[in-house]
Image (spheres, rainbow, N blue to C red):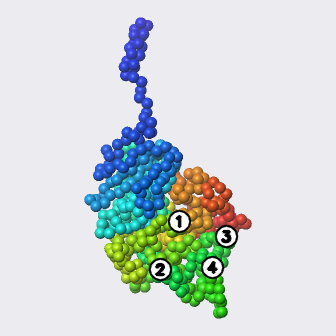
Amino acid sequence: MSRSYMAVVVCLAFLWSLVLGSPEKEPSFKQRCHDFKPLSYVANATVNAQEFISAGQTILYPSNDPSCNRPSQNVSVDICRIALNFTTSDRSHVLSEVWLPQNWTGRFLATGNGGIDGCTKYEDIDYGVKYGFATVGSNNGHNGTGGASFLNNDEVLKDFVFRALHSSATIAKTLTSKFYHQPPKKAYYIGCSGGGRQGLKAAEMYPKDYDGILIGAPASNFNNMSSWRASFAGKTGAPGSADFISPAMWQGLIHDEVLKQCDFNDGVRDGILENPGECGFDPARLLCKEGTTNSSACLSLAQVGIVKSVFSPLYGEGGELVYPAMQHGSEIAASTGLYSGTPFPYSVVYPPLCFPTIPPNKKKDWFRYVVHKDPLWDPLTFSQKDITLAQSLNPFNVQSFPDNLTTFQTNNGKIILYHGLQDQQISSFATNRLHNHLAESAASRAQLDSFLKYFQISGLNHCNSGPGAWMIGQSTQGDSERGFKAESNVLAALVAWVEGGRVPETVEGVKFEGDRKGGVVLRTRRHCAWPSANRFLGSEGEKGENWVCV
């Protein structure tokens, strides 16, 4: 081949490249977000928002129901945000938020709600994208913390019980696959309280939706739990009544006596009970002596009876066990909630001191709008007949107390279940009972433990906060920000179990001074897999290495 011929070929190739132009650059993440067409893949939906959000920006939600107390959300990483409104029937629809992070790890995460509310937990969506999960959350089919939307609308109720979560996750997975041009390699779920119930329901009804489920303080045995919570006003009496025990007495006199009698059971007096089930608390030791004039320093005989009643299980009309007792150690937080004398402190999972804007009348809604279907029903008339009625109705099996989760196990699913031992809203003994119930249907407890591990978190209140080493990575609030590592983050531990077969034997928690992350560490603790409990063996009670599971 002559040199002149080669020169002609090279020149023609150069001219042809000019005609074609240079190869197009890969569009930016921001441009991909702008160009994405979600309605090409989702039917019966509208897009309320589609936008690129850069790290550090704040999303405003001016139309969000005020009772949700979530007017805005700061975003931790660059995301493509897609807000959808999709219909589930001719009388129901769901608002969902799908956040697609630029730093996607190939994982998917769905988030739950709380109580009976319809409040999207934007903070948990942000928690997911922060660690690279494509994440979805929804309003669970209605807006706000109340239940008025349930009245005479079974479609909205159906969304609340199970459909909204399943539909949101299904849609979000589709959008994730289309946006990144590949499906998620693994799917996860996190939820606490009402969100814990949702996680149980998902494992029971849709065992292929998730590979790993993180369930906190689940509102399982839902109908009976609702009745149990309703029963406290009858036990405590109304504020101002002759024998009413004030919050100050619960927080001081009674709580101090609980610690005096039971705190050393774990080997050290640190103000935290590691195993409330071992606490044989006797309130009669606080009985006023004859001639006592300072009634705030002791209990009357009637008040001793009230305390015993508060710490007793709930039984039904036929004497059957409806719900186990409240665990000891939760008196401080429960004093302004369940023990406050307010009827039905149910549908709000947060103590009123934290969220004073939530209207008190929202707290009676499950029995008013679902059980009795009567907005004027008087909660002060609650009786054992209401317990029977609530359980007999059990709409869409909201009870969420499965006999087994074998199909979920067969699909190689994994569950980490946790419950705070100072939970002031849902008794940790109820989750013990759930675990025992599941173990009874399994071939052995070892078989159950092969896919479900249950951890009791000492010093943890309801889902978040508390005096113990409560930050275990369960949520934005519970993220200790010590890295996404299985050793210090329970969601990371779930990922390590699902994807690497690393079985979690303990869950490490941390307590910072003033709960200021990154600040002074007050204590660490390796929380044990139930039925084991921590026992102090060392010389310095605040360090996790001085404790052992026994």
Q: Amino acid at mark 2?
A: Ala
Which picture quadrant has residue 90? bottom left
Q: Amino acid at mark 1?
A: Cys
Label 4, label 2: how far apart the Cα atoms are: 20 Å
Read off the residue under disc 4.
253
Q: Secondary structure at mark 4?
A: helix
Q: Is residue 454 visible?
A: no
**Residues marked 1 and 2 touching at CB (< 8 Å):** no
**Nearer the N terminus, badge 4 or badge 1?**
4
Read off the residue under disc 2.
233
Read off the residue under disc 3.
270
Label 2, label 3: how far apart the Cα atoms are: 31 Å
**Nearer the N terminus, badge 3 or badge 1?**
3
Label 4, label 1: how far apart the Cα atoms are: 23 Å
Q: Residues within 10 Å of mark 2 (few under 14, many from 20)?
A: many
In the rendered image, the residue lying farthest to the left is 90
